[in-house]
Amino acid sequence: MEKQLKDMTVDQRIRYWEKQQQKQRKVRQEAIDKLSTEQLLAVHAMYKLSKEITDEALHGGGVRYIYCDLFNELEEAVQSVFTQFNMGDDK
């Protein structure tokens, strides 16, 4: 019988949570591996642009220092994700 979490030592809890994280990481990686190259590229592009915009807005000069071109690129990335994942039209 597996020990209850409340009965574990600190080291045992650390190992337990490391194993849980590894299991979750494996499940996520299996899902990622099933994506097509186009889907991966679309998600990565959207992540990169949204990260750049939020970093500038929150930690940079603020929203007034974000170029409109970045928003246009983000919109294109969003449209690509919509298409790749059959999310329907954006209306």
Image: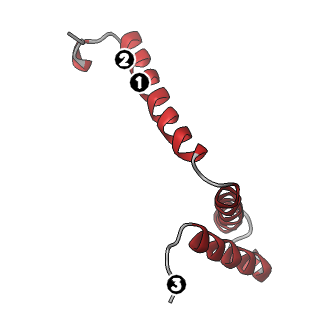
Front residue of this view, candidates 50 and 33:
33
Give the structural element (helix, strand or loop) at label 2: helix
Q: Residue at x 41, y 10 (%)?
A: 11
Tags 3 and 2 in contact by the CB under 8 Å rule?
Answer: no
Mark 2, Cα crowd under 10 Å, few <14 / some 14-19 / many 20+, is some
Which quarter shows the N terminus?
Answer: top left
Front residue of this view, candidates 29 and 21:
29
Q: Residue at x 60, y 74 (%)?
A: 83
Residue type, mark 3 in image:
Asp
Tell me: 65 left or right of 58.
right
Q: Is residue 71 above or below residue 81?
A: below
Q: Residue at x 63, y 64 (%)?
A: 58
Residue 89, given in percent of the width and then of the height, sits at 52, 84
Residue type, mark 2 in image:
Arg
Numbered label attached to residue 13 = 2
Q: Is residue 61 above or below residue 10?
A: below
Circle count: 3
Tags 2 and 1 in contact by the CB under 8 Å rule?
Answer: yes
Numbered label attached to residue 85 = none
Q: Which residue lies under the disc numbered 3?
A: 89
Q: Nearer the viewer, mark 3 or mark 2?
A: 3
The answer for how far apart the CA atoms under marks 3 and 2 are is 46 Å
The answer for how far apart the CA atoms under marks 2 and 1 are is 6 Å
Residue type, mark 1 in image:
Trp
Q: How is the image coloured?
A: secondary structure
Mark 1, Cα crowd under 10 Å, few <14 / some 14-19 / many 20+, is few
Q: Which residue lies under the disc numbered 1?
A: 17
Give the structural element (helix, strand or loop) at label 1: helix
Give the structural element (helix, strand or loop) at label 3: loop
Mark closer to the chain start, 3 or 1: 1
Q: Nearer the viewer, mark 3 or mark 1?
A: 3
